Amino acid sequence: MSSNDHSNPPQGPATRYAVVSFPESREAAAARRQAFPYRFPRDPRSLGGHFSVQENARRLLRFFYFERRLAQALGSWTLAIPEFEVKVETGRHIFYHADAANTLRTRLNEQEQSLKTVDAFRDPSIDRFIDEMLSAADAPELLAGAHQVAGRALCLAYRHHIDLTDSVTDAPTIRAMRRILLDYEPMLEWADAALTAYVDGGVDESRLAAWRWHLQQLLGSIGGISGADAPVAPPSRLRIADKPYERGTAPHRDARFVTFHHTGDYNVADGKERFPKDTYENLRLRFIRTQRDEVDAIEAFGTFLWDIRFLDFKAEYDLARITWDEARHTEIGHRALLASGYDPYELPNRLTGSTCRGPMEPAYAMAEINLFGEVGVLKTINSLIDKARDENDTVLAHVADFIRSDERTHVRKGQHILRCMTHMGNQELELKTRELFTECLISLGAITTDMDLFTVSREDLEHLVGE
């Protein structure tokens, strides 16, 4: 009720206690209220909810863990997803789940849970569910498990929690969950549409339905998302019992792409020059193609998130955000190619970076993309933006301006992430990274075997990998 309307006496348990109200004071209050000119909207909320602070925190901690695990889990599949749209959208969803985890983590800290305690929380039953979900046979099964089972269940759990918790005393939790649901609604809607596209394109719908039922039974056997539901019987056999889950190491693309990994040079891959080497047109097209091929950066940062899981929450969160940024860069490149008159699929897609990074230890893979790739972009992007403006190339100047700010942020955040991955100093890390990538490039045929491993410069590596 509003602050100027107290005509109704309190109801419920509070009426057990004696009320000492002086008639003259009540009449005077009524007169003042009547004379008050403003009639503000009534507040329909009332005190009372199903959860104590302790039970609220127990549920939020479980929600947090599901969200953290889903971000990690989707990251582990970024190499293995072939379809372009699904890979890009997954890069976005990784951050949605990480951001939900971060929001819940903050609320837990407000409810007297230390961040150290929250970050150290583990639940083997949830881990088993996530590992089984990751044992999907292909990308359609992954989407069915991650979105139509886990995602829908989380969405429903949040809505139930909003309805059941105290709308006054626990308003911060309600606000946090409503913010999370803003991402869930388009995410689940997209997943349903994507699975419809898979089925329309020939994927067996009955197989997906059987997989959904299998995962729903497994989720039900652990008390559901909240852990408070009556457990049901688990599935009789889990895939992970036959083969424990391991992330893929090789990058996949769908049938619309022509790919190459033997060079970082687009002209070499194309077999001929589209424009003379030093012309603005060549620099422009190379930059736009590089952004479209940032699909390999979705793969890189997504797999790093999986590979360093539980080492440091901030590093995980930053990796998830960078993965989303790289998904946007990929979209930028794709749309800029369309705006420039190309069919994006007519231009071969470079797999050189992902082919080398996929099986590599994460510290060296991260060093390559952060210390060489992103730093390399920052060396040239200022002059490219200046040239674009001189040429009145509004498309390139616009997109490159945003990409520049992203890459500066990535280089800065990357230092903390690298410190979580390795105790090596920068000089030692750079040298080892150059050595490992030189070996990989030799194996791919990008450079000849008669080169001394330690003579490949930073600039050579930036050019040969192509970032």
Image (spheres, rainbow, N blue to C red):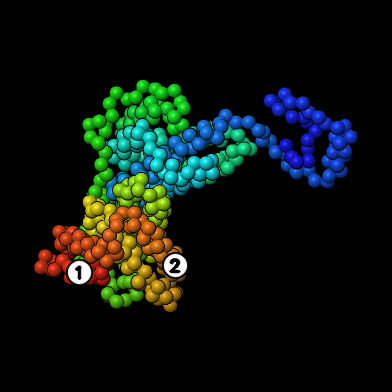
Q: Is residue 70 above or below residue 408?
A: above
Please name the residue shown 68% across and 36% down the image.
Answer: 44
Please name the residue shown 38% across and 73% down the image.
Answer: 384
Q: Secondary structure at mark 1?
A: loop
Q: In which quadrant is the C terminus drawn?
A: bottom left
Q: How many marks?
A: 2
Can you name the residue that lies furthest to the left here?
Answer: 450
Relative image position of residue 352 (x, y in whole percent): 24, 59
Quadrant of the rendered image containing residue 406: bottom left
Q: Point out which mark residue 401 bears.
A: 2
Q: Which residue is mark 1?
A: 456
**Residue 26 showing in the rendered view:** yes
**Residue 285 showing in the rendered view:** no
Relative image position of residue 386 (x, y in whole percent): 42, 75
Left or right? Give the position of 187 relative to 374.
right
Whole-Å distance between the Cαs marked 2 and 1? 31 Å
The residue carrying pointer 1 sits among few (fewer than 14), some (14 to 19) or many (20 or more) residues within 10 Å by Cα, namely: some
Q: Earlier in the sequence, mark 2 or mark 1?
A: 2
Q: Amino acid at mark 1?
A: Val
Please name the residue shown 80% across and 46% down the image.
Answer: 38
Q: Which mark lies nearer to you, 2 or 1? A: 1
Which residue is more in the foreground, 38 or 432?
432
Q: Point out which mark residue 389 bears.
A: none
Q: Amino acid at mark 2?
A: Asp
Relative image position of residue 81 (x, y in whole percent): 30, 46
Labels 2 and 1 touching (C-beta < 8 A): no
Q: In which quadrant is the N terminus drawn?
A: top right
Can you name the residue that lies furthest to the right here?
Answer: 24
Q: Secondary structure at mark 2?
A: helix
Quadrant of the rendered image containing residue 422: bottom left
Which residue is more in the foreground, 184 or 162?
162
The residue carrying pointer 2 sits among few (fewer than 14), some (14 to 19) or many (20 or more) residues within 10 Å by Cα, namely: some
